[in-house]
Amino acid sequence: MHLSYLPILTALFFHPQADGSAVSRLPQWVVPLHYSVDIVTRINQPYQPFGGTVVIDLRSERSTNKIVLNAHDLAIGKQRAVTLSIKDGNSVPISSIRMDIKLSRLTVYVKRPLQINITYSLRVAFTSVLRGDNTGFYSSNYVDHNTTLTQWLAATQFEPNHAREAFPCFDDPIFRTPFKINLAHPHMYRALSNMPVQRTIRHANLKDFVWTQFVESHPMQTYLVAFVISKFDRPGFTSSERPDCPISTWARPDALSQTKFANMVVAPLLSFYEELFNSTYRPKKIDLVALPDYAFKSKESWGMPTFTEESLLYDSQRSSMDDQQGVARAVAMMVVNQWFGNLVSIPWWHEIWLKNAFSLYLSRFGVHTLRPEWDYQERHALKLYLSVLDYDAHVNTDLVTASVPDESQIWAAYNEIGERKAAVLFEMLHRVMGEGAWLTALRRYLVIYANRTATSADFWNLLQLQVDRNGRLGKGLNITRIMNCWLGQPGYPLLTVTRNYDHRTAVVSQQRFFITPQFRNRWSMHPCWWVPLSYTCPSCQNSDSSSSFSRWLTCPISKASARSSSVLLDKLESGPNDWILINMQHSAPVRVNYDPYNWQLLNKTLADPTKFRLIHRVNRAQLVDDLFSLAWSGDIEYDMALGILGYLEHEDEFVVWAATETNFERINNVAKRSPNYLIYKTFMRHLLEQQFKRLLSSDMTSSSGNMTHRAVIIRLACEYELPACVSLARREFMRGTPTVGGWMTIRERETVVCTAVKFGTEGDRDTVESMYKRSNFAAEKESLLTALACSRNVFALQKVLTWTFESSGVRKQNARRTFKAVVSNSMGYRLAKKYVSANMQNIRNFCSNSTDKVVNLMRPLIECMSTPKEMLFFSKFFKEILRDMHGSERLIKILLERGNDNIHWQRTKFRPMLQAIRDIILWRSRSNSKPI
């Protein structure tokens, strides 16, 4: 990035403000009414400069002698670079211009105060160069496999406040303004923007340049403005399902065939959500653009949503079902955001979680309508729920709602786990309120706040109005109060259920759950949550439904109120020999522990291959996840937890094994470098052996492999080096199965390739390297590079790290998965640690000096930490190398707490777990040796 000279130029042309104190927002009494943006981009020249003019029509709602707007890294000339006039009238004399570099603000002072409600035109000329950090107006490149040439493109990423890096503007989400955009560029390039092309004409002064002029847009915020200049000369596919709105998909020329699926699903999703929301969406066109490098997975800009390649491209032969679902999800989220985010927008960035949670939650219904056979609605809901419980079980965790007092704090509001938690809470409200009330509230929200801003409080009020009408929530229950307790405090409750079997009652109490019990005793606060309680049992009439909420765990309304930390469930339908199960199908984000006898009753049912399905598969997944976490935290003993988990030998549902796999990974991260690792490894082989044998004896050519637990079993069996799995993988690799076709799913192919790299020859590894270099498919390249990280050769692993961070062929958004694969390799942990120590500054640059991105990238190293020595090293290292990065102290605390959890578990729980495993193995060997 060549921007070092810009502050110098700016200092020459302006008088920087002496007061660099933070100001929360732009003055809102000067309102932009219209933008005309003309930009010339010399993308084919060294340094890739761009420049142009912006003319902003504006009005002032009070008398003022200054206009304050945003500009960042833009050079603005001194000679007539800034002019002001009454619209279609006389010029207004400017007294001075000041630039606050720290606050990215351009202030224009006028000699006479602006008149109220008079329209003025502010014209600003500017120059800059394309950025290299995937924000603002930036450049990127790709290799065209058809020509083997490197091609450059220019694209925008303006969210949250990067439009100011492309042109001076009022860069605040409160302002909605029409835009007229004109882009000049070399004639061999094509320009796309939010609106259709109005016309293309030759540039009067620049040879071989043309102007692409776009139709004026409807009013929108600056962060939704988007344009791309590239050699994407034609769309991959154009759908005419909506005659008044052509839908096209764009990508690099050699990937156009991979845009078909994304193009196919847009129109059906638009129709589905129009019916769901009872609201029509009529853009003049939709161009979906896949960009080689992009800061977000997708961006919902009006008329031209942009995506990473992995989020838009799909190939049926080389992409997995997960990849296909990812494309469907990304497109569905983009479509939902046209209503929740674009039609109804946020007033400020502290509410960014609201629009993102809407799209995350509501997208699952659209994807389900596309492919009901995916069971996506159920799987996505459970995945979000379990990820929230995992992350939010720590002391250092983020709130859903973040304070954003000024622009320097905006990125603190972007919290992926917080958005997931909010989506989980939306599901809780949806279930409690009922379908009719929930849907009515959504529709009223869109009608009342259309083309306006709205807050979460506005939404809660509409929900309250509906539940007051249908009476379903119950007296004294308030939506705002319920949501504030979940959004405004960290963590979630552990419900403890103690039954009285004679009286058919149960007492349910709550306390905050911590994955590491040492923090529970240190936590002085006593948080409380409003929790809807649902339960089922073998004889319960609602055993197949989670819509029945018998009671609520409540909290004191005021400090003077008596504290309520428990509730009595009476007249239970379950008999003294029947289990009960609380929190049916994750109706609320909680963990549940039972008294020992209820655990025994649950175990009896789970252990019976003919009866375990009496418990719904989602509830079984919850039970498995709770057992792992409660054993890790010390709330139950490992002998009981592993004894119950032994039923997994006959479990055959994907959702259960997906939850199981995550928990085994957490244990394996700590255990694998222990000298006693073989004990745990032997237990895993015993657990997986019968499952794997059943797979081998089944019809492996069945097309249902994507929908079953087969891929998980094969991956785990090969990871724990079950001999039969290793033999299968090597045999299939030698046959050439991992290329295209055959019985395996894409994820199973990745396991086969990983195992072949791990146990094969140098020639096998070279074969996979060649496959990686030849591949033109983003998902396949990521999969192959991850498989190469399975090597036990240190030099090969070093090459993977080098490719990941120093090669232009690896996209930044894929780096974490590959880096995690290296770290998870028993040979790769120390190598990755050494690489990070030597190359941290390069990694910071790789992450565009984003604290969140750096910390997220480093997370796999901490998740595999197991010794105090490693903790001391990383604690000093991160505090030293990241000390100058904004918000690093908070994120480092969050990161290092995960390492402390591992160390505490390794010290206090690892041996009890190994002893429980020994007892189980001994019991099995004795059982098998008994004469029949």
Image: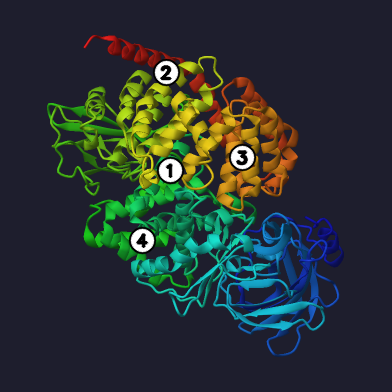
Q: Residue furthest front?
A: 735
**C-alpha span from label 1 to label 3:** 20 Å
In the foreground, 459 or 254: 254
Q: Which residue is mark 2?
A: 913
Give the left or right position of residue 559, taking residue 223 as reference: left
Quarter of the C terminus within the rendering: top left
Residue 805 horizontal side relative to residue 677, left or right: right
Mark 2 or 3, which is nearer the eye? 3
Looking at the image, which residue sits at the far bottom? Answer: 89
Residue 749 image offset from top left, x and y in percent: 50, 41
**Camera sees residue 547:** yes
Label placed on residue 768: 3
Tell me the amino acid under the disc marked 2.
Answer: Met
Instruction: Pick the residue in front: 142 or 8.
Output: 142
The picture quadrant where one finds residue 203 is bottom right
Question: What residue does disc 4 label?
Answer: 461
Task: Give the residue at mark 1.
Answer: 743
Q: Position of residue 114 (x, y in %)?
A: 69, 80
- Residue type pointed to by label 3: Val
Label 3 crowd bin: few (<14), some (14–19), many (20+), radius 10 Å:
many
Q: Amino acid at mark 1?
A: Trp
SS assignment at label 3:
helix
